[in-house]
Image (spheres, helix red, strand yellow):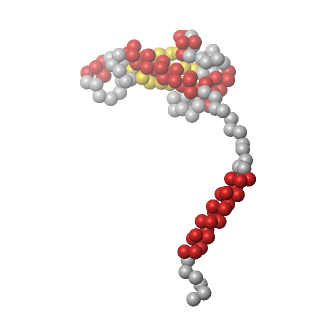
Amino acid sequence: MTVHVTDIPESEIEFTAVRSSGPGGQNVNKVSTAVQLRFDIHASSLPEDLKARLLRLRDHRVTEGGVVIIKAQTTRSQDKNRQDALDRLEDLLKRAQVTRKSRVRTRPSKSSVKKRLDTKTRRGDIKRKRKTPDDY
């Protein structure tokens, strides 16, 4: 079962409007267009295994206390930045839900081992024949 951002109740996602950093003229000083999304993993209604996977992710947006903090400030519109933050949370959820296939240990065949050792021996012979003989 895959979980999407739309499955999470809006009460669990907290949005805060903040001022954007960087250049932007007078608009950057007056209008709070950047959006900061906060999502507490522990207090969420997500399944326990997904919570554990989210906490195990090596992502700078997940704090030590298990809170996801995403700051979106790419556009001058607060609504677009809000949607961008939700999209990034969606990507984080998708990444946490991907399960890697476990590796099955295999042994090389006898013929491949023999072939590798023969090649090494042949290569060593070629290098040995390049040397000047010690008999002189």
Residue 32 in view (yes/no): no
Q: Quadrant of residue 26?
A: top left
Q: Residue at x 72, y 42 (%)?
A: 105
In the depicted structure, whether residue 36 falls above or below residue 108 = above
Q: Residue at x 56, y 16 (%)?
A: 4
Q: Position of residue 99 (x, y in %)?
A: 64, 29
Give whichever of 94, 58 is nearer the camera.
Answer: 94
Residue 27 in view (yes/no): yes
Q: Look at the image and tell me in which quarter the C terminus lies.
A: bottom right
Give whichever of 60, 130 is nearer the camera.
Answer: 130
In the displayed image of the protein, which residue is found farthest to the bottom? 136
Q: Position of residue 116 (x, y in %)?
A: 66, 57
Q: Position of residue 42 (x, y in %)?
A: 63, 21
In the depicted structure, whether residue 19 falls above or below residue 125 = above
Q: Residue at x 55, y 29 (%)?
A: 63
Give whichever of 96, 11 is nearer the camera.
Answer: 96
Q: Residue at x 67, y 60 (%)?
A: 117
In the displayed image of the protein, which residue is found farthest to the left? 25
Residue 33 appears left or right of 15: left
Residue 74 appears left or right of 100: left
Q: Look at the image and tell me in which quarter the N terminus lies.
A: top right
Q: Quadrant of residue 130?
A: bottom right
Q: Quadrant of residue 64?
A: top right
Give whichever of 115, 33 is nearer the camera.
Answer: 115
Q: Position of residue 6 (x, y in %)?
A: 54, 12
